[in-house]
């Protein structure tokens, strides 16, 4: 081990660039890119952490907007109508359930609420928006983000397998993944691995769900009796909708829209590599046992209930 470590330390920047370049190849899928970044981070430690964080965020958002040029408003309404009612119920239910579990496990109140919010809405984005509102400190933010981050990585690989195991259709899987997986990145990654229709359904439903950041943030400010100086506005969601409107109303060349979607898909793959490269041993050590148990319990309950609901509405 002592002979390998100095070697990795010396050439880790080169390995990072090599893996990043490899993710550009068409054969590399989002799960493979995440796995490559994860293995690199756990083997070599952090490399360009600020760069990874910014690129994973902005590249993902840009890729989601690009995917909008591959969808029409008619497809979006057809995809999103089934998940709307359940989204409203599940967001509120998950927040209440998560807070109850956190209290029983004696998880810090703010940490428990952040984990619940990340599960209910859209993972790290929700945590980043709500954290300042409840005046969460760096430790509480790190634990909640780490918990959601780890579960996202697991979901990207686990959900497509379970989808095939349960015989879910493209539409069913897209709806399920949008509801039960935390972050938009893992939702889109898992759905793209499942199929084209699953990707369209998952993207629409998840971004609709992400809009709940705004009302939940306002309600949270009253629950915790605080006022936030900043309110996170998911502008990329509105740009995604604008892209769909343009694609629906303007007769754009098929080559142009197809090219944009192709670049967006590859951008998604790269963003997942950056996310994987951020999951270091330090992040894993930060997450305690009780917050992780809370995150897993909420995740399992939401996954089972949402899957049961999807089976019910499909009959």
Image: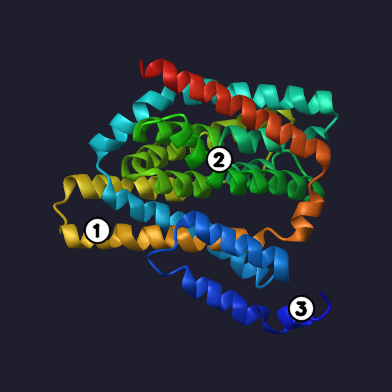
Secondary structure under the numbered disc 1 in the rendered image: helix
| Residue at mark 2 | 122
Q: Can you say whether 40 is above or below 310 in the image?
A: below
Q: Can you say whether 175 is above or below 122 in the image?
A: above
Q: Earlier in the sequence, mark 3 or mark 1?
A: 3
| Residue at mark 3 | 4
Secondary structure under the numbered disc 2 in the rendered image: loop
Q: Position of residue 249 (x, y in %)?
A: 18, 46
Q: Earlier in the sequence, mark 1 or mark 2?
A: 2
Q: Position of residue 155 (x, y in %)?
A: 57, 43
What mark, if any, has residue 191 been given in the picture?
none
Decide if residue 165 is in sight here.
yes
Secondary structure under the numbered disc 3 in the rendered image: helix
Please tell me which residue lies in front, 245 or 80.
Answer: 80
Please tell me which residue lies in front, 281 or 241.
Answer: 281
How far apart are the alpha carbons under marks 3 and 1? 44 Å
How far apart are the alpha carbons under marks 2 and 3? 39 Å
Q: Can you say whether 25 is above or below 193 in the image?
A: below
Looking at the image, which residue is at 73% across and 38% down? 134
Looking at the image, which residue is at 34% across and 42% down? 200
240 sits left or right of 92 in the view: left
Nearer the observer, disc 2 or disc 3? 3
Nearer the observer, disc 3 or disc 1? 3
| Residue at mark 1 | 258
Q: Position of residue 136 (x, y in %)?
A: 77, 43
């Amino acid at each position: 081990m002592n002979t390998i470590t100095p070697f990795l330390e010396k050439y880790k920047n080169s390995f990072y660039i090599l893996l990043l370049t490899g993710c550009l190849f068409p054969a590399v899928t989002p799960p493979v890119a995440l796995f490559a970044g994860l293995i690199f981070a756990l083997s070599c430690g952090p490399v360009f952490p600020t760069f990874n964080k910014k690129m994973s965020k902005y590249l993902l958002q840009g890729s989601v907007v690009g995917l909008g040029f591959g969808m029409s408003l008619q497809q979006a309404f057809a995809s999103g109508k089934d998940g709307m009612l359940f989204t409203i119920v599940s967001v509120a239910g998950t927040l209440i359930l998560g807070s109850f579990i956190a209290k029983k496990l004696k998880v810090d109140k703010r940490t428990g609420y952040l984990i619940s919010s990340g599960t209910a809405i859209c993972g790290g984005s929700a945590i980043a928006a709500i954290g300042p509102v409840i005046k969460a400190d760096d430790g509480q933010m790190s634990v909640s983000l780490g918990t959601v981050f780890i579960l996202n990585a697991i979901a990207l690989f686990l959900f497509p397998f379970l989808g095939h195991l349960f015989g879910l259709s493209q539409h069913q899987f897209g709806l399920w993944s949008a509801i039960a997986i935390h972050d938009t990145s893992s939702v889109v990654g898992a759905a793209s691995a499942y199929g084209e229709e699953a990707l369209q359904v998952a993207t629409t439903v998840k971004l609709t769900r992400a809009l709940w950041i705004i009302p939940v943030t306002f309600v949270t400010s009253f629950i915790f009796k605080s006022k936030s100086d900043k309110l996170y506005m998911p502008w990329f969601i509105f740009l995604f909708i604008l892209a769909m409107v343009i694609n629906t109303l303007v007769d754009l060349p098929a080559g142009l829209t197809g090219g944009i979607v192709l670049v967006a898909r590859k951008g998604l793959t790269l963003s997942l590599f950056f996310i994987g490269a951020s999951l270091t041993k330090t992040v894993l050590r930060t997450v305690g046992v009780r917050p992780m148990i809370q995150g897993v319990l909420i995740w399992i309950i939401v996954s089972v209930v949402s899957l049961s609901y999807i089976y019910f509405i499909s009959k």
